[in-house]
Image: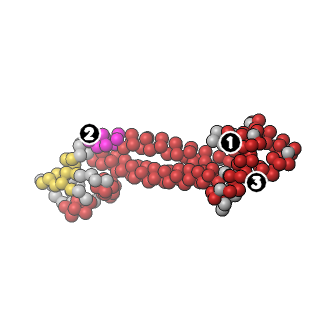
Amino acid sequence: MREGTFYNIKAFKQKVKAKNEALEEALKTYFESGGIIRVKVSNSKEWPELVYPSKKRINYLIKEHEKNLKELEEQKNFWEKKHKDAERYYLIHFFKKYTKKTYWKHLMKLLSDKQYREDAKKVNIPAHLVADKRWEPMIKTFVENEEYRKQLKITFEESPIYKKNKKLAKYSDQLLNFRKQETERKIKEINEKLNSIKKELSALKKIAQWAH
């Protein structure tokens, strides 16, 4: 009987001719994740005895993987919520705007004040986003302050920022698209890690049945 240490499935199969498809697949995954095993080989046709890692060591690794799995699932839930919020942003604010007095003032001015209507059209005021805390102060000031409206109109007409895109809420659109792409990237990244850990965890559980 001799002992051998192995770092990859190819070297293992050169020494061990015995067949055990389930364990061979588990070992392949274990080796790919940087694992090392030491076995006692009686002869090449018999499945060897596992010396290292011990059952205690494997159970520790299983617990660590399960812990990592739980943490990644929590991260995934967080980013999925962020992505859902980004996708529903305009729908949510479509309804929330009706809860704001500023929005109703805006509508009344559109109907009753020709100059206001022209100014609002010129700068494409994003009144539909009045429930967003980032936009509410600016929209409120636009509705209530004539001097501010005039100044904003001049800025909008003369600033090179708005030369190509005549939309005041362009930044909001860009930020929303960035959030969608970033959350999708994060979710994809986490899914890849989850799949890898689940595969490694399954392999460890099979090897645990072989260990002493």
Classify 10 Å Cα crowding around label 2: few (below 14), some (14-19), many (20 and above): few
- Can you tell which mark lies on residue 56? 2
- Residue 97 seen in render: no
Which comes sooner in the sequence, label 2 or label 3?
2
- Position of residue 143 relative to residue 187, above or below, is above
Magenta-drawn segment: 56-64
Q: Nearer the viewer, residue 148 or 78?
A: 148
Label 2 close to label 1 by CB (< 8 Å)? no
Rendered residue at 57%/48% (across/down): 83
Amino acid type indicated by mark 3 = Lys
- Position of residue 64 relative to residue 37, above or below, is above
Find disc 3 in the rendering and name its residue. Answer: 122
Rendered residue at 37%/47% (across/down): 201
Q: Position of residue 151 (x, y in %)?
A: 71, 47
Which comes sooner in the sequence, label 1 or label 3?
3
**Front label number (2 vs 3):** 3
Left or right? Give the position of 129 relative to 104. left
Amino acid type indicated by mark 1 = Met
Q: How far apart are marks 2 and 3 (CA)?
A: 72 Å
- Residue 31 magenta: no
Classify 10 Å Cα crowding around label 1: few (below 14), some (14-19), many (20 and above): some
Find disc 1 in the rendering and name its residue. Answer: 138
Rendered residue at 52%/42% (across/down): 78
